[in-house]
Amino acid sequence: MTSPLIAPSVLAADFANLQRDVEMLNASEADWIHVDIMDGVFVPNISFGLPVTAAINKHAQKPLDVHLMIVQPERYLAAFRDAGAEVLTVHYEACPHLHRTIQQIKDLGAKAGVALNPHTPVSVLEDIIADLDLVLIMSVNPGFGGQKFIERTYERVRQAAALIEKQGSQAVIEIDGGVNQVNAPLLYHAGARALVAGSFVFNAQDPVETIAQLKKVW
Ligand code: DX5
Ligand code: ZN
């Protein structure tokens, strides 16, 4: 079996010591660095934006997995690509012209992802999933770190895996929110192949060891 990709979220890092925390991730088995962009409109919280993303990228030795929790994300795709994004994920709920937005991400040379809020049926991706590199299934309502994992996520992962198979898509299923050592193996067995973890990694006594444990899901 292949290990899942682990994408620690710097939302849970110490913002006054970002370089130190990014260097910790460089030295760990983390595969991607998850960067949560919140605009205070699409979600009820503001995180950080372009200059901080560029500052993270300056020290990061791993690809930046940028999760845009913002309205009209198409306005900022090129800027986040310039700031270092390798994966650009937009929310289904924020994109009335999702097909065009996905093409814009691909034209920028980034991997294209779509995120679904917990209430959005997986089936809405039927006609776009073949074009996606990533499907991000939110396992909490977006906006804050440290929330409780929603148990229905397992069923949604199975639905996404079935849709990917049916449509011949190469998309990777990523899970974001409340991921820990208990649900990680269950998510993997349901079909998830990328796991975001914020508070579980950064609040741990030994974040490097915690990342290593998350990769060993069986
Ligand atoms: C939530 C963010 C998540 C968050 C995860 O809106 O998209 O990436 O950082 O944090 P934890 O792992 O603490 O739930
Ligand atoms: Zn996220």
Image: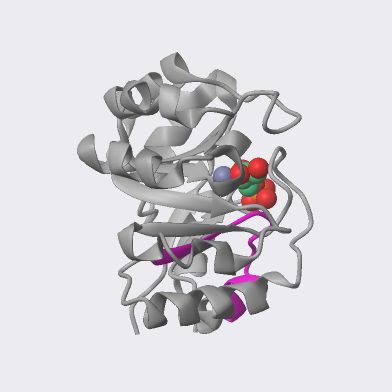
- Magenta stretch holds residue 15: no
> From the viewer's perspective, is residue 209 above or below residue 43?
below
**Could you tell me if residue 71 is visible in this image?**
yes
Q: Position of residue 163 (x, y in %)?
A: 47, 77
Q: What residue sits 30% from the left and 69% below the top?
A: 170
Residue 66 sits in quarter: top left
- Magenta stretch holds residue 183: yes
Q: Position of residue 207 (x, y in %)?
A: 54, 50
On the rendered structure, is 204 left or right of 54?
A: right
Look at the image and name its color scheme. one colour
Q: What residue sits 60% from the left and 80% below the top?
A: 186
Q: Nearer the viewer, residue 52 or 210?
A: 52
> From the viewer's perspective, is residue 35 above or below residue 6?
above
Q: Nearer the viewer, residue 81 or 181?
A: 81
On the rendered structure, is 205 left or right of 151?
A: left
The total number of labels drawn is 0
Q: Position of residue 113 (x, y in %)?
A: 41, 51
Q: Nearer the viewer, residue 197 or 77?
A: 77
**Range covered by the magenta-colored residues:** 172-187
The residue most toward the top is 51
On the rendered structure, is 201 left or right of 132?
A: right
**Could you tell me if residue 203 is visible in this image?**
no
Q: Quadrant of the N terminus?
A: bottom left
Residue 46 sits in quarter: top right
Q: Position of residue 179 (x, y in %)?
A: 63, 61
Q: Nearer the viewer, residue 139 or 104?
A: 104
Q: What residue sits 33% from the left and 23% below the top?
A: 83
